[in-house]
Image (tube, helix red, strand yellow):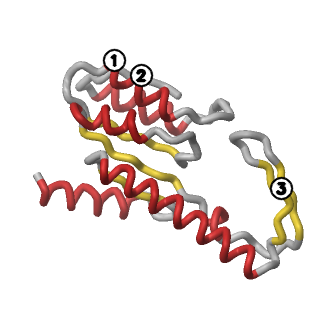
Amino acid sequence: EEFYPPKQSRSQFQKVVSRLLAPRKLSMKTNIKDALAFLASQLKRPTIIFILSDFLSDPFHDELKLLTYRHDVIGVKFEDVLDTNLPSAGIVEIADAENGQRILVDTGSRRCKEQLKLLELHRTNALRESFRSANADFVTISDHLLEPIIELMRSRTKRY
C-alpha cells in the first residue's frame, strides 16, 4: 500500500519503521498482483524486497516470478492465532474484510474448527509452494515475531 524507493540511510530505515508502527486506515481490498507489477516497473537495480501481508489476495504467482527474476523477494505472512483457533462462542457472524461477505460459523463445533485449520493450512502451503517455485523465500509470523525471521536469515546465510 506504500512504496519507499530504495535508499541506504538510517533516516530511510527509521521512516519505514515509523510508518509500519503508526496506526492508519488501509484499503479493504489487498491487491498484491498490482503491487508486484508496480515494483517490477519501478526498481531498476537488484533489490531485496520484503512483502508483509496476510496474503488474502487474488493469485499473483506470475508477477512474483517476474519480480524474482531480478530481485530477492521474501514473503512474510502474518498469522493470527484466532484465524485457526476460534474461541467457542456458539454461532457467530463473521465478515470477510476483503469482500464484505458475511457467513455464520458455529465456533463450538469441533468439525468446523478442524475444517478452518485445514483450510488455513492448505492456503499457507499453497503460498509457500508458490514462493518456492518462484525462487523466493517465505516465512510465517504469529505470536513470536523475531524467531522465524532469525531462522530465515540463518538459512539464507548458509545458502549464500
What residue sits 84% from the left and 71% below the top? 106
* Mark 3 lies on residue: 103
Task: Name the spot of residue 134 as percent of width and height, x first.
Answer: 30, 45
Asked if the residue at tag 2 contacts the one at tag 3, i.e. Cβ–Cβ closer than 8 Å, the answer is no
Instruction: Please tell me whether mark 2 sits on a helix, a strand or a loop.
Output: helix
Instruction: Please tell me whether mark 1 sits on a helix, a strand or a loop.
Output: helix
* Of 129 and 20, the residue lying toward us: 129
Asked if the residue at tag 2 contacts the one at tag 1, i.e. Cβ–Cβ closer than 8 Å, the answer is yes
Q: Could you give the CA–CA distance between mark 1 and mark 2, rounded to whole angstroms? A: 6 Å
Residue type marked 1: Gln
Residue type marked 3: Ile
What residue sits 53% from the left and 67% below the top? 121
Instruction: Please tell me whether mark 3 sits on a helix, a strand or a loop.
Output: strand
| Residue found at the very far bottom of the displayed protein | 110
Residue type marked 2: Phe
On screen, residue 56 above or below 82: above
* Mark 1 lies on residue: 42
Q: Is residue 56 left or right of residue 7?
A: right
Task: Name the spot of residue 50 as percent of width and height, x first.
Answer: 36, 40
- Number of numbered discs overlaid on the protein picture: 3
What residue sits 60% from the left and 65% below the top? 119
Q: Is residue 147 left or right of residue 59?
A: left
Q: Could you give the CA–CA distance between mark 3 and mark 2, rounded to whole angstroms? A: 34 Å
* Mark 2 lies on residue: 38
Answer with the quarter of the image where residue 61 lies. top left
